[in-house]
Amino acid sequence: MSYPNGYFEHRTMDGDRWDLLAYQYYGDASKQSVLLDANRSLFIDPITVPPLILKSGITLIVPVLDEAEVDDNTLPPWKRQEAVYE
């Protein structure tokens, strides 16, 4: 699979979860689908649901997203480009 903006690798530790990794890298836990899609080859059966909690030592692909792909409105105010406090 090709990633237009590139990617980097993450080596899992005990307790890593897809949603937490998505939040760590993208600031949005709902972006876990990006990680799941990029790492689908780790799971032999495409129909099987990947484990929620990952074992340590798995090397995951983390695609680099365009700025436009990260919805700034879903981030907490202090992580937004232009913080708006109401």
Image (cartoon, helix red, strand yellow):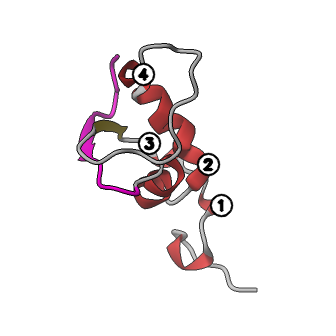
- Residue 11 is left or right of residue 50, and the answer is left
Sequence-first tag of 4 and 1: 4
Q: Amino acid at mark 1?
A: Thr
Which residue is under mark 2?
30
Foreground tag (4 vs 1): 4
- Residue 28 lies, in percent from the top left, at 56, 56
CA neighbours of label 2 inside 10 A, class few (<14), some (14 to 19), many (20+)? some
Q: Amino acid at mark 4?
A: Phe
- Residue 40 lies, in percent from the top left, at 44, 23
> What residue sits 36% from the left and 24% below the top?
42
Q: Are marks 2 and 1 in contact (CB under 8 Å)?
A: yes
Which residue is under mark 3?
66
Q: Label 2 vs label 1: CA separation?
A: 10 Å
Helix, strand or loop at disc 4?
A: loop
**27 over 86 or under it: above or below:** above
Sequence-first tag of 3 and 2: 2
Foreground tag (4 vs 3): 4
Helix, strand or loop at disc 1?
A: helix
In the rendered image, residue 10 lying in the magenta stretch gets the answer yes
The magenta segment is 1-15
- Residue 82 lies, in percent from the top left, at 56, 73
Foreground tag (3 vs 2): 2
Foreground tag (3 vs 1): 1
Residue 49 is labelled as none
Which residue is under mark 4?
43
